[in-house]
């Protein structure tokens, strides 16, 4: 394999551009995963590892895993340990990077016959990653996100998902009300997690028919338009006075309620 040692190399420039630029990721349909475990997940997910970069140290410490990634990649390069430390997005880079093709979800799963979580205008990449990771763990059918949420293929979100982006269909759209209508065609009701005059505690709700819960922005919650587009409003009762739950935690509780009867 060719060894790379300079940040000025065209392959490295391409890698760092995809790491830092959402626009470039959207234009090319490519993204970067960093780290041994998630690189293996990407390679084995079948979505396509276009290019793998492994450091000399990574090859020495994890020879079998690195050889597995290299074998499943279309192209591969060795990078010096010094270069790997300079291009990594983490404080302690493992020296493994893969340029991957974005998974193409089977949109037919969003037919309203499963269980879903909907994220509207979230701001925190960690919350988005937590929701995706939890949705995978609990076996939800899919995650629906508004297009102004953090990019699910950004380094911060990818780390938070722990490889979840390869395990669950993700639908990013700029028209969440239209997505709700598609779910309703399959008989799925959409509940808004919102504190309104008619909101009911989830403990007092019959969740029959509710297959999707919409979670809003961390600071402002769901917009009035989104609330009006939902079928009902539900809340999580607070045992003590204080601020509302973190969006990722709240979404996790709602997802548990969606799936526990199953």
Image (cartoon, rainbow, N blue to C red):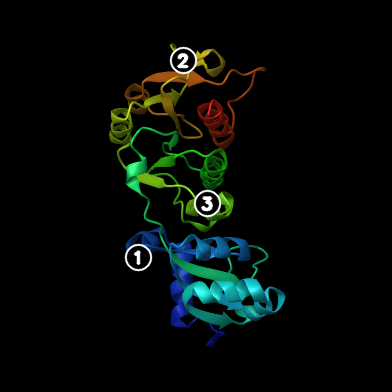
Please report the residue visible at 43 percent of the width from the left and 66 percent of the height from the top: 48
Please report the residue visible at 57 percent of the width from the left and 29 percent of the height from the top: 253
Residue placed furthest toward the front = 262
Residue 1: give its label: none
| Residue 13: image location, x then y, percent | 46, 76
Q: Which residue is mark 2?
A: 199
Mark 3: secondary structure: helix
Mark 1: secondary structure: helix
176 to 46, vertically: above or below: above
User: Is 26 or 110 nearer to us in this picture?
Assistant: 110
Q: Neighbour class for label 2 at 10 Å: few (<14), some, many (≥20)?
A: some
Q: Which residue is mark 3?
A: 157
| Residue 179: image location, x then y, percent | 31, 36
Q: Is residue 70 visible?
A: yes
Of labels 1 and 3, earlier in sequence is 1
- The image quadrant of residue 186 is top left
Please report the residue visible at 49 percent of the width from the left and 52 percent of the height from the top: 165
| Residue 94: image location, x then y, percent | 65, 68
Q: Are marks 2 and 1 in contact (CB under 8 Å)?
A: no
Q: Neighbour class for label 1 at 10 Å: few (<14), some, many (≥20)?
A: few
Q: CA distance from mark 2 to mark 1?
A: 43 Å
Of labels 3 and 2, earlier in sequence is 3
Residue placed furthest toward the bottom = 2
**Horizontally, is 149 left or right of 228 in the view?**
right
Q: Which residue is mark 1?
A: 28
Q: Neighbour class for label 3 at 10 Å: few (<14), some, many (≥20)?
A: many
Looking at the image, how many numbered discs can be counted on the residues? 3
Q: Quadrant of the N terminus?
A: bottom right
**Horizontally, is 154 left or right of 172 in the view?**
right
- The image quadrant of residue 112 is top left
Q: CA distance from mark 1 to mark 3?
A: 19 Å
Q: Is residue 173 visible?
A: no
């Amino acid at each position: 394999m060719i060894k790379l040692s300079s940040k000025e190399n065209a392959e490295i420039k391409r890698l760092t551009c995809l790491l830092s630029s959402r626009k470039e990721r959207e234009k090319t349909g490519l993204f970067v995963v960093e780290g041994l475990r998630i690189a293996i997940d990407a390679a084995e997910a079948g979505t396509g590892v276009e290019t793998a970069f492994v450091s000399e140290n990574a090859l020495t410490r994890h020879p079998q895993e690195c050889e597995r990634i290299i074998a499943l990649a279309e192209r591969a390069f060795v990078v010096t340990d010094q270069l790997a430390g300079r291009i990594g997005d983490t404080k302690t880079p493992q020296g493994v990077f893969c340029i991957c093709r974005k998974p193409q979800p089977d949109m037919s799963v969003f037919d309203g016959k499963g269980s879903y979580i909907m994220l509207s205008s979230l701001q925190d990449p960690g919350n988005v990653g937590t929701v995706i990771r939890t949705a995978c763990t609990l076996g939800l059918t899919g995650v629906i996100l508004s297009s102004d949420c953090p990019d699910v293929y950004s380094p911060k979100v990818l780390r938070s998902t722990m490889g979840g982006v390869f395990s669950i269909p993700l639908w990013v759209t700029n028209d969440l009300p239209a997505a709700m209508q598609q779910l309703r065609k399959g008989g799925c009701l959409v509940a808004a997690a919102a504190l309104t005059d008619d909101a009911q505690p989830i403990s007092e709700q019959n969740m029959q028919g509710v297959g999707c819960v919409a979670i809003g922005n961390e600071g402002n919650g769901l917009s009035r338009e989104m609330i009006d587009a939902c079928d009902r409003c539900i809340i999580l009762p607070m045992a003590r006075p204080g601020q509302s739950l973190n969006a990722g935690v709240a979404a996790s509780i709602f997802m548990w309620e969606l799936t526990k009867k199953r």
